[in-house]
């Protein structure tokens, strides 16, 4: 892999940028792999990258039914933070945040990680009590955070309406300065390029249609392009996890539902932070292009259609217009939905299964993007060593039978 | 936006009048205390999460305030039938 640098930019400028090396190969699948990762989104590509980089497993294929990073990686609102309430979740998301902080250098690919800070607004007394509790818990876990007043919020985001007479009065917020946003596509592409350089085969336009087992152990996957053998199969298929699990005769405690987002026409820079509000169900930031990126709620019912209900968008826009009256004249450009696999406790499943050699990383629900590096890191370790990574142990699928749930509905940001 | 036919009210109404009740036909164990952790967890949390034909409960919250079941395609969102709780669906995954 040729390294990207100012020098390489200059050199390629001399040939009118027509001779850049391809970012990754398009290999023909081999007959057999040590590990097959099902799903070529951010989490799957990160898993393959860390398997190759940290654990020296390079005989890997990532099998993707569409194109790399074309599912939820391309459909989220790119918010990154680690201010989760419980120790287990906070440590997992903060590992991820620490990896984000060095990711562009690690991958030699600009993921445009911008630590512009994240505000979580409180609109009533109970919101503020929860925020104080969560910020205190974060600080005990070594995660930055503070409770800020409406006046401080106004300094951070001047367009916000902090009038006590508004429909959703703002009483305060939690503020995590290390949080921010990143460029969603770049994360997938950066991991894909890094994994490819380490010898991982990225196989696109190939759908896994079955998981072949023998004597209770995985032997490979059936695909739309024939059978491919593997000693281990790691499934990272987000909204379709239930479908893939059924191929191995398993059921998961997840339900798949559309989560919507929308962007406005590009406007001049006016919001240089991320504002989230659980109570009114809106979150908003401004992309580098200038579009306002707005996240809406999740549909109340199961669905695999990558769109969402109109009333959910309407509800979010009402709240955004109340919080930012100036945005009421901004026109919306595009709206879409991604299928999120939600767990009953709003925490992911990173786990071995009852089938030997079959692993699942799913259930990230409405908040998977921020976890991309950490998720890949601990899942790669889990797959390579056939035992949970210490930070993944609490996210075992067994917790739904033992009752050791990790209730992060409050910090997850989107009710589901 | 779904238009849902309530089998009690005998009317098509907007989805905002309804709330979702999750997968239908999950039978509550008659003796919960006799179940082990595995069986109880499976009953509480594990779902088929069908991609395609799905039988699910709906509650007519701003209406007759009664539960009923629907058979819906979770990819196209087409509602194939709605039927009263306690009755069986006419459309199933096998019948299509």
Image (spheres, rainbow, N blue to C red):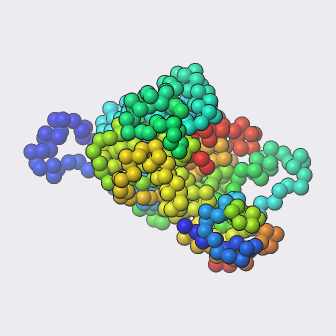
Instruction: Write the residue at 67% across / 60% down.
Output: B19
Instruction: Write the residue at 50% across / 24% down.
Output: A146
Q: Name the residue nearer the viewer: A323 or A341.
A: A323
Residue B8 seen: yes
The image shows residue B7, relative to residue A356, as above or below, that is below
Q: Which residue lies furthest to the left in this view?
A: A14
The image shows residue A250, relative to residue A324, as above or below, that is below
Measured as percent of width and height from the top left, residue A310 is found at 51, 62
Point out the image quarter for the N terminus of chain A. top left
**Residue A383 placement: quadrant:** top right
* Number of numbered discs visible in the structure rendering: 0
Instruction: Write the residue at 49% across / 48% down.
Output: A319
Instruction: Write the residue at 9% across / 45% down.
Output: A14
Residue A187 seen: no
The image shows residue A268, relative to residue B23, as above or below, that is above
Query: As drawn, is B29 to the left or to the right of A82?
Result: right
Measured as percent of width and height from the top left, residue A204 is found at 40, 58
**Residue A209 placement: quadrant:** bottom right
Q: Name the residue nearer the viewer: B87 or A362.
A: B87
Query: As drawn, is A386 to the left or to the right of B91?
Result: left
Measured as percent of width and height from the top left, residue A311 is found at 53, 60
Query: As drawn, is A76 to the left or to the right of A171?
Result: left
**Residue A29 placement: quadrant:** bottom left
Measured as percent of width and height from the top left, residue A152 is found at 43, 27
């Amino acid at each position: 892999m040729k390294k990207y640098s100012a020098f390489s930019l200059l050199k390629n400028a001399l040939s009118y940028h027509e001779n850049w090396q391809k970012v990754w190969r398009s290999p023909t699948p081999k007959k057999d792999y040590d590990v097959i990762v099902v799903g070529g989104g951010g989490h799957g590509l990160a898993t393959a990258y860390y398997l190759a980089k940290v654990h020296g497993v390079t005989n890997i294929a990532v099998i993707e039914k569409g194109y790399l990073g074309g599912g939820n990686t391309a459909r989220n609102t790119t918010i990154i933070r680690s201010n989760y309430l419980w120790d287990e979740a906070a440590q997992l998301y903060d590992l991820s945040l620490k990896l984000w902080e060095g990711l562009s250098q690690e991958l030699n690919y600009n993921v445009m990680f911008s630590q512009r800070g994240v505000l979580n607004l409180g609109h009533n007394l109970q919101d503020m009590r929860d925020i104080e509790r969560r910020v205190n818990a974060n600080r005990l876990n070594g995660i930055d955070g503070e409770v800020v007043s409406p006046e401080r919020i106004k300094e951070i985001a001047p367009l916000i309406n902090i009038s006590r007479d508004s429909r959703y009065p703002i009483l305060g917020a939690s503020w995590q300065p290390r949080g921010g946003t990143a460029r969603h596509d770049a994360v997938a592409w950066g991991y894909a390029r890094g994994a490819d350089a380490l010898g991982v085969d990225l196989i696109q336009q190939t759908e896994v249609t079955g998981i072949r087992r023998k004597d209770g152990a995985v032997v490979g996957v059936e695909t739309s392009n024939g059978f491919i053998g593997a000693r281990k199969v790691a499934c990272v298929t987000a909204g379709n996890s239930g479908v893939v699990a059924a191929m191995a005769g398993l059921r998961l405690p997840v339900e798949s539902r559309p989560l919507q987002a929308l962007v406005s026409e590009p406007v001049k820079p006016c919001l240089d932070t991320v504002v989230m509000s659980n109570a009114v169900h809106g979150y908003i930031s401004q992309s580098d292009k200038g579009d306002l990126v707005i996240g809406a709620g999740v549909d109340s019912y199961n669905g695999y259609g990558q769109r969402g209900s109109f009333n959910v968008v309407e509800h979010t826009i009402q709240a955004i217009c109340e919080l930012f009256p100036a945005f009421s004249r901004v026109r919306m450009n595009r709206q879409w939905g991604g299928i999120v696999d939600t767990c009953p406790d709003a925490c992911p499943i990173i786990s071995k299964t009852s089938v030997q050699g079959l692993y699942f990383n799913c259930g990230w629900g409405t908040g998977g993007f921020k976890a991309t590096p950490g998720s890949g890191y601990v899942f790669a370790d889990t797959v390579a060593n056939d035992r949970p990574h210490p930070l993944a142990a609490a996210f075992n699928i067994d917790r739904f039978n033992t009752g050791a749930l990790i209730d992060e509905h409050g910090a997850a940001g989107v009710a589901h | 936006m779904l238009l849902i036919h309530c089998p009690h009210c005998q009317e098509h109404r907007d989805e905002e009048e309804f709330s979702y009740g999750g997968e239908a036909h999950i039978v509550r164990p008659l003796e919960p205390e006799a179940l082990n952790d595995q069986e109880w967890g499976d009953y509480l949390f594990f779902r088929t999460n069908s991609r395609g034909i799905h039988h699910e409960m709906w509650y007519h919250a701003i209406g007759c305030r009664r539960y009923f079941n629907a058979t819906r395609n979770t990819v196209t969102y087409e509602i194939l039938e709605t039927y009263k709780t306690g009755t069986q669906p006419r459309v199933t995954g096998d019948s299509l």
